[in-house]
Amino acid sequence: MPIFRPRLWAGSLAALLTVTAVCAGDAVARSFPFGPHTRSVNDLGNQFVPFHARLWDLLHGNADGGVLLNWSSGYGTSFLPDLGTYLTSPFALLVGVFPRDRMDLAVYVVTVLKMASAAALMALLLLTLRGGRWWAAGVLGASYALCGWSVVEASYNPMWLDGLIALPLLCLAGEWARTGRHRIAAPLLVALMWAANFYTAYMATLGAALVLAVRLCTEREDRRAVVRGLVRAVTTAGVGIGLSAPVLLPVYLGTKHAYPGWNRTFAPAHWPDVFARLLPATYSFFTPALFLGTGTLLLACALAFQRSVPRRERCAWAGLVAGVALSLQWGPAHLLWHAFATPNGSPYRQTFVLAGLVVIAAWISVSYDWPGWRALVGGVAVLVLIGAGAGFSDLVTPWTYPLFAAGLVAAVGALLLVGRGRRSAVVAAVLLVGAQAGQAAATTAFADRQRLNRLDDYAPWGERQRTQAAAVAGADGWPRYRTDPGREQTTANDPLLVGGQGAAYYSSLTPDVLTRTLRALGGGWTSNGRALQSLDNPVTDAVFSVGARVRMPRDPHQGWNAPDGRPVTVSREEAPPLVTVRGPDAPVPYGRSPFRNQEQLLGTAVYAVPPTVLRAAGGGPAGGGPAADRGAYDYRVGRGTYTLTARCPAATEAYLWAPDLFGSARLDDGPEIPFRGQLPQRRAPMQRLGAAGGSTPVTVTLTAARTGTVPHEAIGCLDRTRLASAVAGLQRTGATAVHVTTHGIRAELPPGSTGTVVIAAPRIAGWTCRGRPADSYLGLLSVPVPARGASVECSFRPPGLRAGEVIGGAALTVLVLGGAALAYRRRGDRERANPA
């Protein structure tokens, strides 16, 4: 149909321009997949690539667990909230067509496709709001997808790009509600966007509501039509969000059960920095990335001076853009945009909404007519003032003003030429397209380099991951025992990336009970407790049924200057089964000492914890004082070298617990063991120093690179003989057979078992055993031994899933009944119009 051709051409141009600019920028920066520089920075390499690898395993039937339960990470965690947070975008399914060892490429392709889709959909929205030149809509659609927020921040947070797609789609749904069209498709679009990523969809919904409000105010419809449009819009949003409830509620409740992480207070950015982020080639994590391309900004700034646009529309759209821009800097509005919780990372995640509104304002400006001299001069003056204000910001780089000036000259030249015949219009289009693509490509390349300089980075899949995955696969014995992929991790989600069933787990939904349990046992973390590390300790390995452990050399991409030269090894130990039987008595609650806590969970005393003496390099005693987060008394250390001494029994192994130490430790003349603690953000795990004991005191040399603390009870002396005896006892009373499923676990118990069944998995919310909520045994899943019966079975259902299914079913019923009523009414209208 001819009416759809301009929209198709506009969408195609927008998508093509977006893909070209992004790939060109990455190629200039020699970033993956166009060069040797990794693009897996920060959470992209640490979270999102491993989670997409987990999705690949689910799609191909290779995962330990299923959609509800993840047996690979954190010794067993809920997976549906992670799925709804990171992987429910329809684009994520595309990773299934790539080889698993090309997951980095798969995520890159998905990222570029999302940006191209957002560009095409914005172009479609613009032509739906008002007719106009299709190529101008295409350029503006591309400028939206290539905004600074997209290429600088969301490009390595691919689930945020679902919000970039959601804004034009939800605006379309609002337009359909206003005009009474597509009453079934509109709620389905809302449901799709909220299920894909509810966080950015929430922001996009607020933006779409503002666009709808302006449309209702400027279209001069009668009051009844406005009310009907509002009712249809609210109903559409309500039904659509209700349809997404089976994913939405588990994600929401998953955040309530998660470890709290950081608690930040919002601080508005300085206005010169805000102005600077409107310009190309700037970078900052705590300012709004508002770059859109100089041509788009010029058209938006010219709107207020564009006489061909009705005054009511000029005031409404210009006022909306200004109001939203100011709301980004106001604390209460900031909380509203972010669902009343300041995010741990970038505080301007709603910037894409403002970018979309600026693009719409630019389209309203140009859809009536090209700007005349008055509008052009006014728009240039506003842009020059913005550029001058940005001069007071440290974010401006040597590339910023030359790119800005070139784009401004190209945009002004194009607008002067566009009305002077077909040939001039072609030249104008080329100028606008070239300026947009050039500025966006340069900003993309600049951001690629800046991210590598400022953020942690992770290597794409290579020899290290292949070696690690092969070692895990060769040792795997799940569910007879767990195989931990290792303490020297490649990412914080190694079990998802290379296989195995370990403690390592990094998510925004890391369960509070898991973090606190591993903290009590001497575990380490980063990201303020959200990124848990593997704990290489024989006692906790016995408790959690870790029968095989991979040990790797250190990864240079984890901040080490070079690998440490150690070979890849797989160590095997006798381990109790996943399900063991303990005595009927309640265990003593955890205390401060992780050595004693491990003994409580094991059920046997295996450590000697001697008094220690810490002395400074000169021989004097180290200071003491209240620790940063524990309230007890520890040694305080500054930068320098210290000596920690204690006496261990003969034939034992010395372990050091110094969670706040940032530096290294060495037992006598042994190798240096790195510690990377800095509470509360980083917590160093308990680590083995070497064999100890006998008549010679244990002497540990501590080198502190930063100020920190060392506990008085920092050294534990492990008796391996006692540990072996304890493991043998747990094997005798443990389950004779264990069966794990995608949603639970079943175990056969030895005849005559009494006491408490303890399952080596964290007691996260959602577990039920024998028809009632499961018990907790020092943070682990437990249930009393059945009075009659030789088996026990527990099942897992994420909190909120049942309520979400009920709400989703009710919303689906409303949608079906509404569709049936609509079809019946239309049939009646046709019969009345044509009685024959």
Image (cartoon, rainbow, N blue to C red):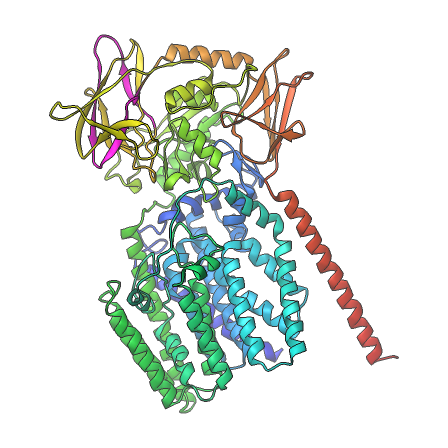
Location of residue 771 in the rendering, given as x and y in whole percent from the top left corner: 67, 29
In the picture as drawn, the residue positioned furthest to the bottom comes out as 420
The magenta stretch spans residue 700: yes
Above or below, 727 relative to 679? above
Residue drawn at x 35%, y 52% as measured from the top left: 39
Tell me, yes or no, if residue 417 can be seen here.
Answer: no
Q: Is residue 816 left or right of residue 587?
A: right
Q: Which image quarter is the C terminus in?
A: bottom right
**Does the magenta stretch mainly form a helix, a strand or a loop?**
strand
- Quarter of the image with the N terminus is bottom right
Q: Is residue 160 above or below residue 272?
A: above
Q: Is residue 826 left or right of residue 259?
A: right
Q: Quadrant of residue 558?
A: top left
283 is within the stretch colored magenta: no
* Residue 638 image position (x, y, % from top left): 19, 34
Task: Tell whether 583 sits left or right of 414.
Answer: right
| Nearer the observer, 410 or 278 | 278
187 or 132: nearer the viewer: 187
Q: Quadrant of residue 389?
A: bottom left
Numbered range of the magenta stretch: 686-715
Kindly tell me whether residue 120 is visible in this rendering.
yes
Residue at coordinates 43% horizontally, 74% vertically from top-left?
139
Q: How many marks?
A: 0
Q: Is residue 728 above or below residue 105?
A: above
Residue furthest to the left:
618
Residue 294 image point, x, y percent: 35, 74
